[in-house]
Image (spheres, helix red, strand yellow):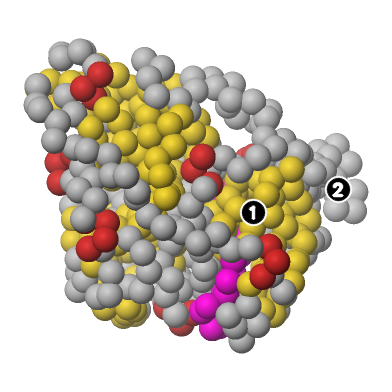
Amino acid sequence: IPETITSGTALNARSQNAAIVAGKTGQVLGYKNGILGPTFRVQRGSTVTIPFINGLSEETNIHWHGLLVPAAMDGHPSQMVTAGQSFNYTFKIDQAANMAWYHPHPHEKTGKQVFTGLAGMFIVESPEEKALNLPSDAYELPLVIQDKRLDANGAIMYSPTLEEVMIGYMGETITVNGVSSPFQPVTTRMYRLRVLNGSNGRMYNLALSNGNSFLIIGSDGGLLTAPETVTSLLLAPGERADLLVDFSKIALNSEVYLQSNSFSGVSSQGSQTFKILKFMVNKTETDTFKMPTSLNSITPLSTASATKTRTFDIGVMMDMTSGSHGGTMAMKGMHTINGKIFNMDRIDEIVALNSTEIWEFDNTNGDEPHPMHLHGTFFQVSSRTGGRGNILSHEKGLKDTVLVMPGEKVRIITKFEKVGKFVFHCHNLEHEDDGMMLNFEVK
Ligand code: C2O
Ligand code: CU
Ligand code: CU
C-alpha cells in the first residue's frame, strides 16, 4: 500500500531504481520512492498545494484525473514543465468525495511516462461519506492495477510497435500498487477496495476466483446512489471502481484472488483469465459494518435539459494491409476523433458555460475499444446502443471515463461548469498519443 500524504508534499518526477519483481532492481520513473506516487487524502473544501519538480530529462506535467480543477491547473498538454523546472499546483477541492488519480499529460509522451511509472492516487473525503461508516483504515485498500513489461534486469520497457499502437501497449507482469505477485492478508469482514485501472491499454474483467458476488458502491465521480451486486466488472484504462468485498464468506486460512476473467468483444485481449491480487483470510473478526440504506443522491440530468448534441466518430477502421490513411501504414494519426488528430492550438469544440449537452461517441464501425475521457467535468451515461446494449452497474454514478466497445454508440450528458480549455480523449494511452484527442473550450 503506497504511503498516504496530504497537501504540501512535493512530488519529484525522476528516474530511479525499483524492484517490481522481487530480487530484480531496474530503472523506472517515480514521484517519490519506487514507481507510482504516494496516495493523497484530502478533505472536500480544502485547498491543496503540491510543489512539483520535474527531475526528468524531458518535459512533463501533472493532470489531476477526476478532480475538477481550474483549467490552468489541469495539466493540459500545452502546460508543460520543462526538464529541471518546477511548478506549484494549487487548487480547491470542490466536489463530492471520490477516488481520483494523477499522471503526466505531455502530448505523444503520456503513454511512455505513465507506463514507466508516473501515476498515483488521489482520494477526496467528505463528512457525508464519513457518516456512512464505510470500511476504512486497514479495511480500505487503494489498488492501482497496471501491467508492466520488464527487461531481464527488471527495468520497465516502453517501445510500442505499430501493432501495439493499435491495440495498446501491454505487459506480461501484472502489478498492484507497483508490485508483482501481490498478496494482502485480510480478516473475516467487509473490505472496501478502491480500484483504479492505471494501465495504458489493458482492460480487466474483475472477479473473485471463487465466483462470489461483490458490491459496486462507487465509480469515477463518487458513490452510486445504491450498491449494485455483480460477479464481474469490466474496467477500462482510466476508470475507477469502489467495491465492497465480504471476506466473512471465505473460510479462515484460505485464499481467494481478485482476478480478471476472460471476456469477449475485443479480439486483441480478454481471451484469458489471470490472477491480479491474492487475499489470504488469516484472522477472525466480528464485522461491525452495516450497509447504509442510501449511499448518495445524484440528480439525473434530463436529456430535455440538453441544449446541444455533439457526435464524435471514434470508429477508426483498421486495415493493416492497405492502411486506412492513404495507402501507407502511417505511424501517426491512425486514431482520430471525427477524422481529426490532436492539435494543441486548435479549439475543436466551443461549449457555453453552464450549458448541459449530450455527447455521443460512435464506435459502430470500429474494431477497437475506446475508453473516452473528458477533463473538467463529470458526466452521466445516458444511453448505450449496440454491443453491450445498456448502461452498466458501475455507470449508474458520475463518470469521467466511459468504455465504448466496438459496435457501440454511447451517449453521455453533462453540465459544463468549468471555464477554459480542456481536452477529451481516448484513455488508451497509445491511442491518445497517436492523436485521438481534441480540445474543447468552455466560455
Ligand atoms: Cu487520465 Cu487526460 O487523462
Ligand atoms: Cu483526466
Ligand atoms: Cu482508443
Quadrant of the rendered structure where residue 103 is? bottom left
Q: Is residue 425 covered in magenta? A: yes
Quadrant of the rendered structure where residue 125 is? bottom left
- Decide: is 161 above or below 107: above
Q: Which residue lies furthest to the front in this view?
A: 293
Q: Where is residue 438 in the image (x, y as percent from the top left)?
A: 67, 68
Q: Position of residue 336 (x, y in %)?
A: 74, 58
Q: Which circle's residue, 2 or 1, is located before the other in the chain?
A: 2
- In the image, which disc is placed on residue 214? none
Residue in the picture at 60% in, 53% down? 381
- Decide: is 298 above or below 356: above
Quadrant in the picture for the C terminus: bottom right
- In the image, which disc is placed on residue 324? 2
Q: Give the range drawn in magenta.
A: 414-430
Q: Is residue 341 covered in magenta? A: no
Q: Which residue lies furthest to the bottom in this view?
A: 443
**What amino acid is found at the position of numbered circle 2 in the picture?**
Ser
Q: Where is residue 278 in the image (x, y as percent from the top left)?
A: 28, 24
**What amino acid is found at the position of numbered circle 1 in the picture?**
Ser
Q: Crowdedness of circle 2 by 10 Å Cα count: few (<14), some, many (20+)?
A: some
Number of labels in the image equals 2
- In the image, which disc is placed on residue 382? 1
Q: Can residue 332 be seen in this view?
A: no
